[in-house]
Image (cartoon, rainbow, N blue to C red):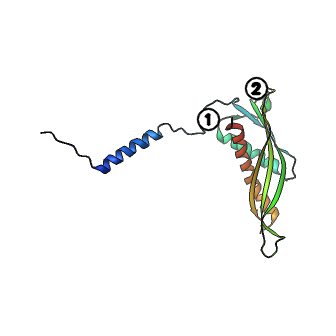
Amino acid sequence: MRRRLRFPLPALALAVGLALLGSGCMGYRLGTGAEAPLAFSTLHVAPVKMRALVPQAEAVITGAVREAFANDGRVALAAHPATAGAVLEITVRSYRRETATADPEDTGLARKLSVVLLAELTLRAGEGAETPAKTYFRARPIEVRRDIFIDSGQQQAEYQALPLLAQDLADKALHAVLDTW
């Protein structure tokens, strides 16, 4: 006499679900998924040039951009343009404040401001590249903004927002240099 095996329906559904989940995750890889190799493997981040009046911003922005590229790991940072495959130049063109919220008692007094930083990025081949005169992109605009509350003072609020603006700019610069082409 033939004996028929009986699987409970929940166990069968669980096995099918795990099989589908496992097959869906087999092709997953960590990272950004960039298939094509980059045109360069080393990058020199030039010190930021300031055309806007933002005290002490050069060092903060340059440090944030370098840290973003170092943490990403797809390119190695070069100390000098002569040893780099590419050079990233950042120029901060403007820094402005926009009123976001006014005090209901006095509409001329702002309580919340949006600070906006506009920068331009230029990526060119480094002196150590095969074609040193090549420019990958020139004067690509990047705008970052942060809201600040000025209840405890505008100067202090802007000073505290500067590292956050620098990090946002660094993230956008990283994407512009490594992800879009």
Give above or below for 90 relative to 99.
Answer: above
Residue at image mark 1:
34
Residue drawn at the location 75% of the way across and 52% of the way down: 165
Q: Secondary structure at mark 2?
A: loop
In the image, 11: left or right of 153?
left
In the image, 135: left or right of 75?
right
Q: Position of residue 163 (x, y in %)?
A: 74, 53
Check whether the beta carbons of the residues at disc 2 and disc 1 lie within 8 A of each other: no
> Tag 1: Cα neighbours inside 10 Å, few (<14), some, or many (≥20)?
few
Q: Position of residue 159 (x, y in %)?
A: 79, 58
Nearer the N terminus, badge 2 or badge 1?
A: 1
Give above or below for 74 relative to 95.
Answer: above
Residue at image mark 2:
129
What distance separates the C-alpha of mark 2 from that of mark 1? 21 Å
Residue 65: image quadrant is top right
Quadrant (top left/top right/bottom left/bottom right) for the C terminus: top right
